[in-house]
Amino acid sequence: SRIALYEHTQPRYVLWEEVIKGLDIKGDESVLDVGCGDGTLLIKLRKKQGHSGALFGMDISSGILKRPINLADSQRLNIDFIVADAQHIPFSDNSFDVVTACHMIYHVPDIDNALLEMARVLKPEGKFALSANSQKSKSEVLRPLKEAVAKRFALSMFPDATRRFSIEEGGDLIKKHFKNLTLKKYRSLISLNSPDPYVAYFNTLRSLWDDNFSDSKWSEIIEFVEKELREILKREERIEETNIFGIFYATK
């Protein structure tokens, strides 16, 4: 649901395409995607790019892996998906030619240890790519909306992931474990004539904000969010804000 919001951006950047393009891989490398989510990067790499190397995806959520596992098996894509923690990657040293981590590092409790683990399993001179958001991203609508919800319902402020890791400050952490670091930045405009994609996005924040929200309380919050978004539409005619992210590239 969160990914779906970015389908309304111009220009439209497809993250997996940008990551693969920036890595400039040959096509036979062994690849580990840490925090692979729905497996899109690996599945597209095999199907669209014809990649012949060994592909591994890992995520801490067994639920989110059901779809890519079923898809990979049904289409005989020969991709291995495993449930694992980025802080304890279950592979030996120097196992992979390429390691990727897309929009996931800020969810890890010990970010430094996760980066250390990714470097450990990467081969010498192997390629590394990590994507993350900017602290300035989605500051016109989504951030004020979170603040309005916190104020209206007397809640603690939503834990902004970019305060834990962003393209502005994340480079220093990566440099501790990798070399030849570069960053490519992307900027686009989210533009909507309906509140629905934002409501769907906001609805996914429930457990990230507070696991103890009752159904009735959360329904009240979502109603408030939709009302606020409709007020923006009425006033501005569209819901628009800037989306900014970046992809770090490095080697071991």
Image (cartoon, helix red, strand yellow):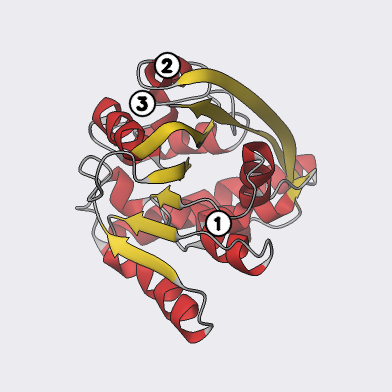
Which image quadrant is residue 241 in? top right
The amino acid at mark 2 is Lys
Task: Report the amino acid beneath label 3.
Answer: Arg
Lateral position of residue 179 relative to residue 27, left or right: left
Q: Amino acid at mark 1?
A: Leu
Report how far apart the C-alphas of labels 3 and 1 lie in the structure: 24 Å
Please provide percent x and percent y for residue 249: 56, 29
Task: Locate the C terminus and report the quarter of the image it occupies.
Answer: top left
Give the left or right position of residue 81, taking residue 241 as reference. Answer: left
The disc label shown at residue 96, or none:
none
Residue labelled with disc 2 = 175
Residue 35 appears anywhere in the view: yes
Q: Exactly how many numbered labels are in the figure?
A: 3
On the image, the x and y values in percent for residue 6 come to 65, 50
Measured as percent of width and height from the top left, residue 34 is found at 38, 48
Secondary structure state at the residue bearing disc 1: helix
Mark 3 lies on residue: 164
Q: Say whether marks 3 and 2 touch (CB < 8 Å).
A: no
Question: Is 123 placed left or right of 244 in the picture?
Answer: left
Query: Under tag 3, what secondary structure?
Result: loop
Please say if 34 is above or below 160.
Answer: below
Label 1 environment density (alpha carbons within 10 Å; few <14, some 14–19, many ≥20): some
**In the shown orientation, is residue 115 left or right of residue 223?**
left
Which mark sits nearer the N-terminus, 3 or 1?
Answer: 1
